[in-house]
Image (tube, rainbow, N blue to C red):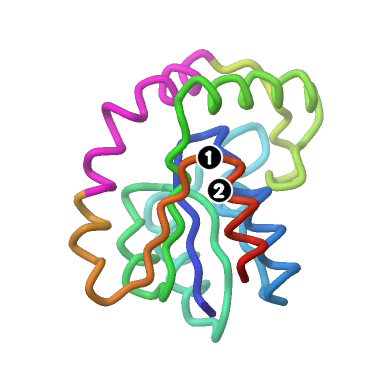
Amino acid sequence: MKKIILIGSGGAGKSTLARELGKKLQLKVFHLDKLMWKPNWELVTREEQIQIQNELVKNEAWIIDGNYGGTMDIRFQAADTILFLDYPRTLCLYRAIKRTFQYKNKTRPDMREGCHERFDPTFLKWIWRFPKDKRPDLITKLDNLASNKHIVIIKSPQKAREFIQSI
């Protein structure tokens, strides 16, 4: 495991797990949220997203957390390991709401400075609809990659802790 991506619903804990894995494996961690957003929640262009990710995957070893479905194939092709946090939507929604209050008017550690945490109904709706709107395509992509990538589907925070301990 030298090139690891973490995907999953918002609020699943991708960034937290990425930091823990980075410490344990001594790998550099890249949070896509920190790289894809400019201050005041302005998303970089698609061309910039592609350029940023193409540069990241050139590194010899890394952990990258984040979805960004339009550019996910860049990371899928380069990764040797894909971790999918496949948690219940209620847990992800709870965590996202909790995070909103925890970091209200502040920037989370995995976000670009100037992107203060805020209540975002559109994001919460995206989380709620993730199992229906995003998960089926992700499962299909993972099934297609299973022959040449190490894929781990993690179903709960307890399973994530067990995974970290098993390394």
Q: Residue at x 22, y 73 (%)?
A: 147
Residue at mark 1 = 156
Q: Residue at x 33, y 29 (%)?
A: 131
In front: 105, or 160? 160
Q: For numbered disc 2, what is the local secondary structure?
A: helix
Circle 2/circle 1 CB separation < 8 Å: yes
Q: In terms of image quadrants, where is residue 105?
A: top right
Quadrant in the picture for residue 129: top left
Number of marks drawn = 2
Crowd tier of the residue under label 1, counting other residues whose Cα lies within 10 Å: few below 14, some 14–19, many 20 or above = some
Q: Residues within 10 Å of mark 2 (few under 14, many from 20)?
A: few
- Residue at image position (32%, 72%) is 77
Instruction: Give the amino acid at mark 2.
Output: Lys
On the picture, is 83 further left or further right than 163?
A: left
Q: Is residue 39 above or below residue 91?
A: below
Q: Amino acid at mark 1?
A: Ser
Q: Which residue is mark 2?
A: 159
